[in-house]
Amino acid sequence: QVQLVESGGGPVDTGGSLTLSCVYSGNSFSEECMGWFRQSSGEEREGIASIDSDGRENYADSVQGRFTISRDNAKNTLYLQMDSLKPEDSAMYYCATNQFGYCDYNIAEAEFENWGPGTQVTVAK
């Protein structure tokens, strides 16, 4: 059974940076397509970044150029480096695994599972 736990969220000023971590408990991290999602109050969950087992990255337009997804297979950990943060980046951030085992162009919530509890990011105006 895969379990994911996110950390690293918190308050930050506009223009600041944060690095989120997602620790994976299981046996197949290096083979997984991993994704980061976020959800603001009253909004649908948005897929913002994914990375496949070969390290290929994919980003939503809303974060392209500002966020970087990475993974450390030796540590079973997924990261999200967030730079140039804006107030509209405020949300609960989640990591998840792709249930089909591969990443495709659309970072679709319906394709992901094993959701962690999330970590809150709040960007001050």
Image (cartoon, helix red, strand yellow):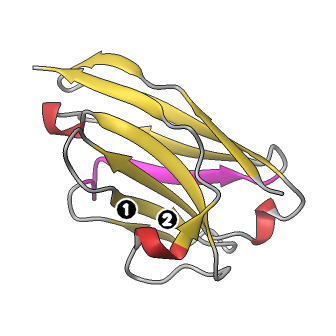
27 lies left or right of 120: right
**Kind of element beneath mark 2:** strand
Image x and y of residue 94, in percent: 49, 46
- Name the residue at the left extreme: 125
Residue 55 in which image quadrant: bottom right
Q: Residue at x 41, y 72 (%)?
A: 107
Q: Quadrant where the N terminus lies?
A: bottom right
- Name the residue at the right extreme: 27
**Residue 116 seen:** yes
Image x and y of residue 100, in percent: 64, 83
Would you name the residue on which mark 1 appears?
47
Categorize mark 2 by other alpha carbons within 10 Å: few (<14), some (14-19), many (20+).
Answer: many
Q: Residue at x 65, y 53 (%)?
A: 71
**Circle 1/circle 2 CB separation < 8 Å:** yes
Question: Is 66 in the magenta?
Answer: yes
Would you name the residue on which mark 2 appears?
50
Total marks in image: 2
Q: Residue at x 71, y 69 (%)?
A: 32
Q: CA distance from mark 1 to mark 2?
A: 8 Å
Viewer-nearest of labels 1 and 2?
Answer: 1
Image x and y of residue 76, in percent: 78, 48
